[in-house]
Amino acid sequence: MPVITLTINDELVSGRRGESLLEVVREHGITLPTLCHMEGLSERGGCRLCIVEVEGSPRPVPACTTMAREGMLVRTHTTRLIRYRRMIVELLLAERNHYCAVCVSVGHCELQNVAAALGVDHVRYEYLSPRVTMDLSHERFGMDHNRCILCTRCVRVCDEVEGVRTWDIAHRGVRSRIMADLNYPWGESETCTSCGKCVQVCPTGALFTKGAAVGEMVKDPGMLRRVLEGRDRKEWEG
């Protein structure tokens, strides 16, 4: 793959043609927060936490969906970008009901970790406090819409890795909700294979294992990579 050079935070760095800015940035030890991104899944650019400034672009762009190009001038941690990231996290916290103290994923939540890393210790916006429900109809797993940030990792892993597309999004805007099949209770889904991949990639406590204590509800971020690499090696073929 041809090598390209670009400038990130006034430092000349190299990358490979076809890589995203997020990949190049992380390869050079620069930390960018993400919530919708997960290695092994298609990029969505939905959470906008990985936004960077690119010279010539009138507005910040998501690093995960922007391809690195020869000669790019990129800044990753300007005052404006940090302000935007904090604002995004505050809006996510205000949109649903994120009561960390009673969440099964407290201490293992990516949203919580990103908020802490950005110094978000309060929310300046009015909480919407929507009346949303939990779906406990599945035998092994539960869905708490209060914690969902609509990152769509569950939708993408179900479609792109498990290949059944049980999950999708219903409605629009602040009324958007993750739904199983055509908005049936999860336990009544005729497509769900109960593989649990959606639970493992969920960054918050929105998808969880029933009966799991807080200390047990640790997600396994390496699961997806092991599955994909195992398929490449045809480990499960007879």
Image (spheres, rainbow, N blue to C red):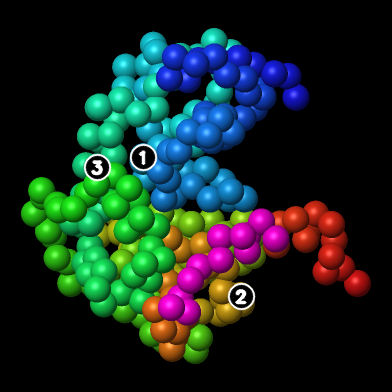
Q: Position of residue 14 (x, y in %)?
A: 62, 20
Label 3, label 1: how far apart the Cα atoms are: 11 Å
Q: Which residues are magenta?
A: 215-226
Cα–Cα span, label 2 and label 3? 34 Å
Judging by the rendered image, the residue that carries numbered circle 3 is 86
Left-right relation of 147 to 207: left
Regarding residue 181, the answer to whether it shows in the image is no
Query: Percent x, y for residue 154?
Result: 49, 62
Of 227 and 154, which appears nearest the observer?
A: 227
**Amino acid type, mark 1:** Arg
Q: Residue 123: x and y, percent?
A: 14, 52
Q: Does the magenta-highlighted stretch encompass residue 219?
A: yes
**Is 7 situated above or below 34?**
above
The residue located at (25%, 27%) in the rendering is 79
Q: Looking at the image, is mark 2 or mark 3 nearer the viewer?
A: 3
Q: Residues within 10 Å of mark 1 (few under 14, many from 20)?
A: many
Q: CA distance from mark 1 to mark 2?
A: 29 Å
> In the image, what residue occupies the spot 91% across and 72% down?
238
In the displayed structure, does residue 39 sit left or right of residue 55?
Answer: right
Taking the spot 43% from the left edge, 19% from the top edge, the residue there is 9
Label 2 belongs to which residue?
A: 195
Provide residue 106's location: percent of width, then percent of height: 34, 70
- In reply to whether residue 19 is colored magenta, the answer given is no
CB atoms of marks 3 and 1 within 8 Å? no
Query: Of helix, strand and loop, which one carries label 2?
Result: loop
Which amino acid does the dot numbered 2 rest on? Cys
Residue 143 figure quarter:
bottom left
Dot 3: few (<14), some (14–19), or many (≥20) neighbours within 10 Å?
many
Numbered tag placed on residue 48 in the rendering: 1
Which label's residue is closer to the chain start, 1 or 2?
1
In contact (CB < 8 Å): disc 1 and disc 2: no
